[in-house]
């Protein structure tokens, strides 16, 4: 076999291998491709190692993988997550808290992790902080079922401590897959831990909030956590800062901005 025929056999072999891999995933019940296998920063994937001569084949493979990924449902992701024990939080939780809301939501709220009430009920933001979040959503003239609500980590950290770096890195691929399934137009990060984890920064929430940041191509608005508003009061400066942030979110979504009067 000459060098010309050898060069053209490599893409064919690559295509056959990837097709077989996709078929194996479908037989196992996973229709989508985990995001970390496709889009992980700095990953040296097989597709990235193909030569420029094989660019057409590489593009076709990428389209195939991306098409499969886009069809991954929240139900499939939850099934893949299963009774997760991938990090140490799995040993101490009562219930895994996956997420709740509209699977086609235009707006997604992301917190840092479940608290005691959430751990008990298996649903995010159902305690006092959840009531405050519901108040924010209602002030936007939206309903809880209109949006999607989830957390960076799916299990409660002991004593409600912030999630640790290894816990975030283990769980965040599932959050990425959730967002890729939902394809929201805006993400709101609730609180310092969530914003810093998503944006991979140590900048405090007071400096992050008030402007949009890019998160994998999605506009992300960091804002104060509802529990912080509970501590500072319902008519505090921080409450109105959150409202200013939500006003920007509504404007980006091209939704009406309700008039709110600030009472001192």
Image (cartoon, rainbow, N blue to C red):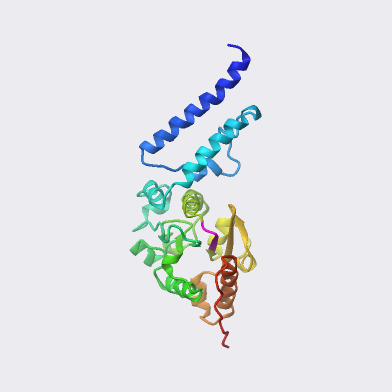
Q: Please identify the quarter of the rendering in which residue 239 is found.
A: bottom right
Q: Main secondary structure of the magenta part?
A: strand
Q: Position of residue 223 (x, y in %)?
A: 57, 68
Outermost residue, top side: 1
Query: Which residue is at the front of the view, 29 or 238?
Result: 29
Which residue is at the far bottom? Answer: 264
What residue do we see at 59% from left, 79% from top? 237
Residue at left offset 41%, top offset 34%: 23
Q: Is residue 3 above or below residue 162?
A: above
Measuring 58% from the left and 17% from the top, which residue is drawn there?
6
Q: Quadrant of the N terminus?
A: top right
Q: Position of residue 42 (x, y in %)?
A: 61, 41
Residue 225 pos. (x, y %): 52, 69
Picture residue at 56% right of the left edge, 71% below the top: 246
Instruction: Give 114 or 209, whichever is nearer the viewer.
Output: 209
Question: Does residue 227 belong to the magenta stretch?
Answer: no
Left or right placement of residue 153 versus residue 208 in this view: left
Give percent across and percent down for residue 81: 39, 48
Closest to the observer, 92 or 58: 58
* Residue 58 can be seen in this image: yes
Residue 234 lies, with reference to residue 214, above or below; the image says below
**Residue interval drawn in magenta:** 184-188
In the image, 212 versus 170, the foreground residue is 212
Dividing the picture into quarters, in which one does residue 149 lie? bottom left
Image quadrant containing the C terminus:
bottom right
């Amino acid at each position: 076999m000459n060098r010309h025929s050898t060069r053209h056999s490599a893409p064919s072999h690559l295509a056959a291998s990837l097709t077989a891999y996709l078929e194996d995933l479908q037989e196992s019940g996973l229709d989508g491709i985990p995001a970390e296998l496709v889009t992980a920063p700095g990953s040296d994937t097989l597709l990235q190692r193909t030569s420029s001569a094989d660019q057409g084949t590489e593009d076709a493979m990428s389209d195939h993988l991306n098409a499969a990924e886009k069809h991954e449902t929240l139900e499939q992701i939850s099934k893949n997550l299963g009774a997760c024990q991938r990090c140490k939080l799995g040993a101490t939780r009562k219930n895994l808290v996956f997420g709740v809301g509209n699977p086609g939501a235009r707006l997604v709220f992301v917190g840092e992790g479940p608290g005691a009430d959430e751990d008990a009920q298996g649903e995010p933001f159902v305690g006092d902080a959840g009531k405050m979040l519901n108040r924010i959503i209602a002030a936007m003239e939206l309903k809880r079922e209109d949006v999607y609500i989830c957390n960076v980590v799916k299990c409660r950290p002991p004593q409600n401590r912030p999630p640790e770096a290894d816990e975030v890195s283990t769980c965040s691929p599932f959050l990425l897959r959730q967002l890729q399934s939902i394809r929201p137009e805006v993400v709101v990060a609730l609180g310092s831990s969530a914003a810093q984890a998503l944006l991979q920064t140590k900048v405090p929430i007071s400096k992050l909030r008030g402007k949009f940041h890019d998160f994998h191509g999605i506009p992300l608005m960091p804002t104060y956590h509802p529990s912080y508003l509970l501590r500072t009061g319902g008519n505090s400066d921080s409450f109105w800062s959150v409202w200013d942030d939500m006003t920007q979110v509504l404007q980006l979504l091209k939704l009406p901005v309700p008039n709110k009067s600030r009472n001192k």
